[in-house]
Amino acid sequence: MTGADIQFYLAIFFRRTPYIAVIFFTAVALSIVAALLMPRVYRSTAKILVEAPVIPADMVKPTVPTSSLDQLLIVQQQITTRANLVELAKQLELYREKALPPTDDIVKDMRSRLVFDQQLLGLGAAAVFSVAFEADTPTLAAKGANQLASLILLTNQRQRTGRAGDTLEFFDAEVTRLGNELNSAESELLKFKTEKRSSLPESLGFRRQQQENQQLRLTSLEREAADLRTRRSVLVDTFAATGQTTTGVVAPKQQVLADLNKALADQLAIFSETSPNIIRLRARIASLQAEAAPLGGPNVDRVTGIGPRSGIELQLADIDKRLRGIEAERSKISDEITLITQSIDATPATETALNSLERERAHIQTQYDAAIARRADASLGEQVETRSNGGRLTLLEEATPPETPLKPKRRLIVAFGAAAGIALSVLFVALLEFLNRTIRRPKELATLLQSQPLAVIPYIERSQDAGLLRRGIKSAFSGLKFG
């Protein structure tokens, strides 16, 4: 670009100065009017401090698992619901001097007035939460911000203490329920043990030892009975053969008969009555008794072979009495063995049922102990929340009436209007020059003729034309001023 081009553009600028001035001052005037007509908006801010728990969580388990900051965000969502915003507008009397708008418009307007912000003070440390409210007057803005802060603090405290109380109440009910179930299980277990006391597994070893002792006792009684029966047979046979007891000299046949009776008694302790050995011994004894019968004498009884001897009768009576006692005791012991055997056989089923009852009781006991521990934690948590020793919210700074409005930014609006005026005027001048096809420079004439002219004579303006132009500009400014 040459010096001639610069002079040309400067000449165009000075020639179009009236247009630039008109557009610029018009834009500035409009921006000033707009700034003055826009309503003032004041913003007041209240600050809430989100404190860390006073008592560490590893010492007392909190009943409210969410952090205070998360609780604050939850409360923020709760207070910005439709019903709460309408109620807040009524409390602040925002539309007292106006016609009450529709509910949707009220909710939209209230949400546009609220501003929430948070600032973390450090990792794991406290945080500051700001609540701002915008209104037409400073007093109303401060009142709205303080009302919001109080609502947040009250809602948060109510929720934390309420949740802690609900947790404690739940575990109280759980402990009561499990206690009743535990008492019922213990009563059922005690009733079962009482009914099945004869077949309980803890006494199985004792009953088996008792069964073994009774078996040994029964074997001993059978041997004693066999010995008594042998003795009785010997007494009877000896007296029948000799008329004397076994205290005297015994004949060879009587001695053989006595030995056979003793052998029979020993065999009976081992074999049954149908055993071939028992049958042979009884046949042999019967044969010897038949051979010894003619030697008995006139004083021998035909049935028993015993004469009217008082000594032998007393001995036989004692033996018979003892045999009857042994038989009664054997019957009693057999019944006891039968009962013990039945209880031993019933022990596995009893043990299975008992284990089921004990498992159920142990399961309920475990739940009961856990509920007791959790109730203790819930009680401590409730005390922590009630005394505000956990994570809590406190009002750090109340909202005060602002001294200057937040909106509108009048200087910024005027500056923007001035910049817009300059831009519009430049665009307007550029558009005029673009549409102007008049030849104003020799260069343009050479371009049009496509050859270099010998000389160029510029347009000489008449004095009448200059006067008309000045009068036109003066009329335009007068119309802008008084119009």
Image: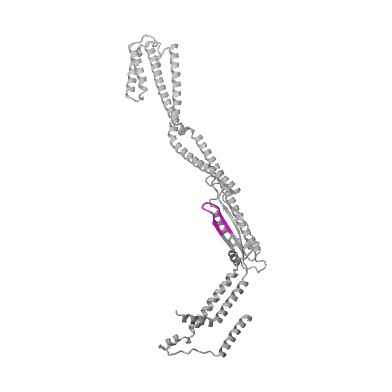
- As drawn, is 93 to the left or to the right of 361? right
Instruction: Single out the residue that lies furthest toward the top.
Output: 249
Image quadrant occupied by the C terminus? bottom right
> Which residue is pictured at 43% across the width and 17% down the height?
319
Please identify the quadrant where the N terminus is shown. Answer: bottom left
Q: Where's residue 275, x and y in %?
A: 33, 25
In the rendered structure, the answer to whether residue 77 lies left or right of residue 276 reads right
Give the image location of residue 36, x and y in percent.
62, 72
For residue 146, above or below residue 241: below
* Residue 257 figure quarter: top left
Instruction: Answer above or below: position of 25 versus 147.
Output: below
- Provide residue 477's location: percent of width, then percent of height: 60, 82
Report if residue 367 lies within the magenta region.
no
Q: Report the front residue among 154 and 375.
A: 154
**Residue 476 lies in quadrant:** bottom right
Q: Is residue 127 magenta?
A: yes
Give the quadrant of residue 285. Answer: top left
313 w.r.t. 358: above or below: above
The segment highlighted magenta reads 117-130
Of 380 and 417, nearer the camera is 417
